[in-house]
Image (cartoon, rainbow, N blue to C red):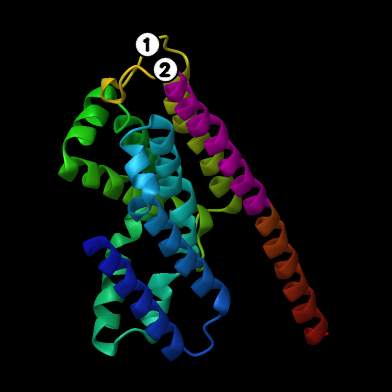
Amino acid sequence: MALALILAATATAYLVAARRAPGWRAAPTIAFLAGLALLAAALLSPLHGESERLLSAHMVQHLLLTLIVPPLLVLGRPAALMLRGGPEPARRPLASLLRRAAPLGHPALALGVFATVLVGTHAPAFYDAALRHGALHDLEHLLYLGAALLFWQVVLAPAPHPRAASPVVRMLLVVAAMLPMAVVGVGLLIPDHVVYPAYGHDLADQRRGGSIMWLWGTLVLAVALLAAGWWAVVREHRRQLAVERALGGAS
């Protein structure tokens, strides 16, 4: 119930700010609301209950929390929106907070945090403890969401700024992120025994979970890689057109 109220309040605050922000486009709003809806689906729908019983359902939940929900939230550009349409007293502190947090956007740090969280939380000792203790399970979900938001903020760089990584670096980050996905997936596919005893002795479900994490995770990242490459080409084309127009106007 508390999470549902938080998500509803977040959506409401976003929509209010979007109405107040001059010229705010519909695309970021749609992306952000879709991200919130899928976050609710991951944590509040029957999927969450199934994830307590089936490892494969748990892996679907983890993919939603790391590869689907975060990029949608990032594309919603909530910080940029709050700076334009949020409450006036909150804008200056938010701008200051964003400046102080800028070092967290280093590509190597973002990738390192993402990989460490993904692999570390799937270590049997941590994973089984998270299944037994609700508070630790909630912390696990927060770690996924936080690490993935940091990673996708660097990869997508939705608002141009001087410290944004180059398109090539961002594409390499996506490729590198396939490795921890593979480590977790293969770690579930190869063993001939159940890795997480909390799920009983369902080796077939464990292998389904490994396939979901490795193959589907890699597929999502591959799509993101293609999209990033296409967008880099589009941006470069637009830049070249702007240069040509400027040169034509000067002549």
Quadrant in the rendering for residue 18: bottom left
In the picture, the quarter occupied by the N terminus is bottom left
The alpha-carbon separation of the residues under discs 1 and 2 comes to 7 Å
> Residue drawn at (50%, 60%), measured in percent from left and top?
157
Where is mark 1, residue-wise?
193
**Residue 146 horizontal side relative to residue 176, left or right:** left
Residue 33 appearing in the image: yes
Q: Nearer the viewer, residue 199 or 210?
A: 199
Q: Is residue 234 magenta?
A: no
Q: Residues within 10 Å of mark 1 (few under 14, many from 20)?
A: few
Dots 1 and 2: beta carbons under 8 Å? yes
Figure check: 16 above or below 175: below
**N-terminal of the two: label 1 or label 2?**
1
Main structural element of the magenta stretch: helix, strand or loop? helix
Side of 236 where 103 appears, left or right: left
Range drawn in magenta: 203-229
Could you say which is closer to the camera, residue 67 or residue 59? 59
Question: What residue did someone put label 2 on?
Answer: 203
Amino acid type at circle 1 is His
Kind of residue indicated by mark 2: Leu
Quarter assignment of residue 127:
top left
For image coordinates 33% across by 33% down, the residue present is 53
Relative image position of residue 54 (x, y in whole percent): 38, 32
